[in-house]
């Protein structure tokens, strides 16, 4: 039999090599490389220097090279001034472990069999759920988050100490392959170092960093689907990034992201060991995963697939363990429920994976579907629903559509047209027989990237590994590859997008690692050939590491110097500098209209996007024809500041916007503009502003003087008028007043009330009153929850003051 199977496996390797050579010959080298030498040279210098450091210090410290890499990472963070962000990331990891460990022990888990990674992910899932709930309320402050991370560590420090000691044993282990460890350490340090760079990714700046920054600045997430159509989508990843951002801002959020990439690497190792693979095979699998350009895509910018995939892959490992005969099925059922529920709360695409895992469970129901496990099954389903259901219940409560804005032709939410929502995309649906070749060499059809982004393991190693496992009856390894393939088939029916199958990259790498672990005399030659192909894959992946992203630049100057970082952003992404400027100028935090790419993470107010993020605003902007139209729209939305890209839209539309705004700052193609004064505050809300009559005004019984054209008041006998307002809207409150007898002080005052006339807050400006009438004004913003404003004519002392006019304009 082996005489037949070995040639077939070798033939599949030859076929993969031929396809790779043919695809490569169709590429224009060196133009096919995703960047010029000045982008590659920092990586090469970095690899050479760090390789020498790792080899020297690992020998000196007598620890393996992966552990030495951790020391180097600490050194890098100290040199780059990001040590606090790294501390916060580790703090979050330890707190997640302590919390998860406590929860699982509460559910009667066997401490001896409990995986540290599983405990940490359970804790992270609970933290993410808690942040998602807390985001509804204005309570999100660094102090609260720090307290939430400190409590589990305070009570669970013994468990943490035991976990650290177990890691210490790993540190002292002799490496089974120094070269594999060195390669893993080098690539891991590339991922780590790039995560310290400034964020320039589109999705990150538009959503995944925008949400944490918004939460830190405004202390709550508004779940406002009228402003952000994605406001109620599953956000487990963003909530976890928010923990890092709340305590150490952008760098900590990016480090948490890359931390989940490393967690995935450890889970891949666990999958290989579970499937019967060797330590060498596990290292092969981790190396293949970390060198995959798509993995670098996920780590170099703040996407959420790292978090999502970690929960899904960890949950799948619990499911796989249910398929074997053991005595811990209750434990595996509970962890599967928590972890897969967290995956559902991170990304709705999980629903395309669950049926595949369910089929495997059903096929082996006689093992785990026993009467003694009924309680565990019920708890598992309950935990899955409690964690996974939070974002969908939230969306249903706010919009009437649990998967808003998707499938709105069924749920008919009033906040979105009754049509099937599809975000703008250029990717296809379905599967073809040559999908692996197309994905490898025509990657633009599957990702915003270039050839090679999926990695070359699919075309060179996937089929040979599948055949290898069939030949040696490596059934568990086959399960990994079959699950990876089935999830790709199901997901691609909706959208053939590589980021949506990221967990399959982990399962696929693990399956290949199992194949590379085969110990069989008849297949040793084939395994060696497969290992050579593995080396080729790693080298090709490294050469095209940036093929899946435009964001993963590495610069030693940018890592170290703040001036260099600002210069880099000025030249490559000036909108980030524009956002900082608007934050300084927009003291009232009024909404900002963004006529450019929506890369506004860090904006301390709402952003109004004329695109599918905000269909209402987009439609209004498209109908704009004159300066008055756009001015009225901006005033209606309470906009004072505009960010305009000189290449946005058509010239006529830009000209109209420029006609009603004044330029404040220009950097590259990005211009910060402000609504012209003659367009601001044109709509008077008060009645009888000049006191020609007292219509609308509420006077006290002891008002000092009432005459047509004026009113005399004091702090104890004010006049007031109630008007309707909109929360977040900007208003101008002005008064004209003078003192008749003696100098005193007056107030420009407005009290904010909710819909039930309950007091919220007040804005007051005190002015000195003189015998000559003078006008005093202040600009105010209606706070969150405000529905009414009580506008006052009042003094600041008991001495009378005469008001001849009070105005309140929007």
Image (spheres, rainbow, N blue to C red):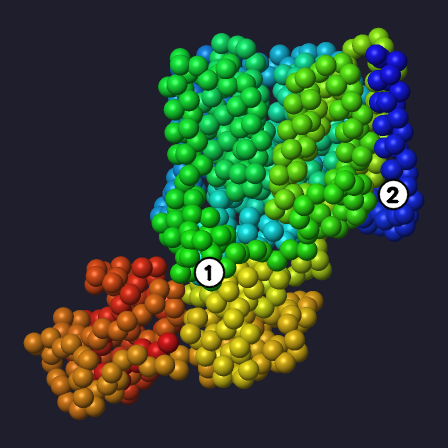
Q: Nearer the viewer, residue 627 or 718?
A: 627
Q: Which residue is mark 1?
A: 418
Q: Is residue 768 above or below residue 772?
A: above
Please provide percent x and percent y for residue 558.
71, 47
Mark 2 and mark 1 in contact (Cβ < 8 Å)?
A: no
Residue at 54% x, 18% y: name it. Answer: 364
Residue 403 appears in the figure: yes
Please provide percent x and percent y for residue 230.
50, 53
Name the residue at the left extreme: 701
For marks 1 and 2, the one nearer the N-term is 2
Please provide percent x and percent y for residue 159.
47, 17
Q: Is residue 45 above or below residue 29?
A: above
Q: Nearer the viewer, residue 760 or 798?
A: 760
* Residue 235 horizontal side relative to residue 296, left or right: left
Q: Is residue 377 above or below residue 612?
A: above
Image quadrant where residue 545 sits: top right
Q: Nearer the viewer, residue 71 or 40?
A: 40
Residue at 60% x, 37% y: name it. Answer: 306
* Residue 121 horizontal side relative to residue 13, left or right: left
Q: Which residue is mark 2?
A: 23
Q: Of discs 1 and 2, which sits in the foreground?
A: 1
Q: Is residue 155 above or below residue 770?
A: above
* Residue 467 horizontal side relative to residue 324, left or right: right
* Quarter of the picture holding the C terminus: bottom left
Q: CA distance from mark 1 to mark 2?
A: 44 Å
């Amino acid at each position: 039999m082996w005489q037949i199977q070995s040639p077939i496996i070798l033939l599949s390797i030859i076929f993969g090599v031929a396809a790779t050579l043919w695809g490569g010959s169709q590429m224009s080298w060196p133009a096919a490389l995703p960047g010029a030498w000045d982008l590659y040279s920092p990586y090469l210098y970095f690899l050479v220097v760090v390789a020498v450091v790792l080899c020297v210090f690992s020998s000196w410290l007598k620890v393996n090279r992966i552990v030495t890499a951790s020391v180097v990472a600490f050194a890098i963070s100290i040199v780059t001034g990001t040590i606090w962000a790294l501390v916060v990331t580790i703090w979050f990891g330890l707190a997640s472990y302590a919390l998860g460990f406590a929860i699982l022990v509460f559910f009667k888990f066997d401490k001896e069999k409990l995986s540290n990674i599983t405990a940490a992910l359970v804790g992270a899932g609970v933290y993410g759920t808690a942040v998602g709930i807390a985001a509804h309320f204005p309570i999100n402050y660094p102090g609260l988050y720090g307290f939430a991370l400190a409590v589990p560590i305070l009570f669970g420090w013994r468990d943490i100490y035991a976990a650290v000691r177990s890691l210490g044993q790993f540190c002292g282990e002799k490496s089974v392959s120094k070269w594999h460890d060195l390669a893993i350490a080098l690539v891991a340090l590339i991922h780590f170092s790039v995560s310290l760079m400034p964020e320039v990714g589109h999705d990150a700046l538009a959503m995944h960093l925008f949400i944490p920054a918004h939460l830190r600045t405004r202390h709550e997430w508004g779940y406002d689907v009228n402003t952000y159509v994605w406001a109620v989508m599953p956000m487990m990843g963003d909530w976890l990034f928010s923990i890092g951002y709340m305590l150490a801002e952008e760098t900590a959020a990016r480090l948490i992201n890359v931390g989940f990439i490393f967690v995935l690497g450890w889970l891949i190792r666990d999958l290989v060991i579970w499937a019967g693979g060797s330590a060498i095979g596990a290292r092969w699998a981790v190396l293949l995963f970390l060198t995959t350009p798509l993995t670098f895509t996920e780590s170099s910018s703040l996407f959420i697939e790292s978090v999502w995939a970690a929960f899904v892959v960890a949950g799948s490992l619990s499911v796989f363990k249910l398929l074997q005969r053991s005595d811990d099925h209750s434990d595996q059922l509970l962890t599967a429920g928590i972890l897969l529920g967290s995956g559902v709360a991170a990304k709705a695409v999980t629903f395309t994976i669950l049926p595949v895992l369910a089929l495997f469970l059903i096929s082996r129901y006689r093992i785990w579907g026993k009467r003694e496990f009924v309680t565990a099954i019920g708890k598992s389903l309950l935990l899955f629903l409690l964690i996974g259901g939070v974002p969908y219940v939230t969306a249903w409560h706010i919009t009437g559509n649990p998967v808003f804005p998707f499938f709105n032709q069924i749920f008919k939410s009033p906040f979105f047209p009754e049509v099937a929502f599809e975000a703008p995309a250029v990717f296809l649906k379905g599967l073809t027989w040559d999908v692996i070749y197309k994905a490898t060499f025509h990657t633009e059809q599957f990702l915003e990237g270039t050839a090679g982004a999926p990695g070359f393991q699919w075309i060179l190693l996937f089929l040979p590994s599948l055949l290898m496992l069939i030949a040696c009856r490596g059934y568990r390894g086959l399960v990994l590859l079959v699950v990876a393939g089935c999830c790709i088939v199901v997901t691609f029916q909706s959208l053939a997008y590589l980021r949506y199958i990221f967990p399959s990259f982990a399962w696929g790498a693990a399956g290949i690692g199992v194949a590379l672990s085969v110990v069989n005399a008849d297949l040793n030659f084939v395994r060696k050939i497969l290992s050579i192909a593995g080396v080729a894959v790693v080298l090709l992946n490294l050469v095209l590491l940036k093929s899946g992203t435009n964001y993963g630049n590495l610069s030693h100057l940018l890592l170290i110097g703040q001036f260099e970082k600002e210069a880099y952003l000025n030249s490559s992404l000036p909108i980030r500098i524009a956002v900082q400027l608007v934050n300084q100028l927009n003291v009232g935090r009024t909404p900002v209209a963004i006529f450019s790419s929506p890369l506004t993470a860090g904006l301390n107010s709402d952003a109004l996007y004329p695109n599918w993020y905000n269909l209402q605003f987009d439609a209004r902007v498209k109908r704009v024809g004159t300066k008055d139209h756009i001015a009225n729209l901006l005033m209606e939305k309470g906009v004072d500041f505009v960010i305009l890209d000189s290449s946005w839209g058509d010239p006529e539309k830009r000209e109209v916007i420029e006609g009603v705004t004044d330029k404040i700052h220009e950097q590259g193609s990005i211009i910060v503009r402000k609504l012209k004064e003659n367009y601001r505050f044109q709509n008077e809300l008060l009645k009888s502003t000049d006191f020609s009559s007292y219509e609308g005004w509420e006077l006290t019984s002891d008002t000092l003087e009432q005459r047509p054209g004026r009113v005399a008041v004091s702090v104890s006998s004010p006049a007031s008028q109630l008007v309707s307002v909109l929360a977040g809207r900007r208003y101008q409150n002005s008064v004209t007043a003078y003192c008749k007898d003696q100098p005193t002080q007056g107030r420009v005052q407005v009290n904010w009330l909710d819909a039930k006339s309950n007091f919220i807050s007040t804005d007051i400006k005190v002015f000195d009153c003189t015998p000559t009438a003078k006008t005093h004004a202040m600009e105010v913003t209606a706070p969150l929850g405000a529905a009414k404003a009580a506008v006052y004519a009042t003094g600041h002392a008991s001495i009378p003051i005469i008001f001849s006019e009070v105005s309140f304009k929007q």
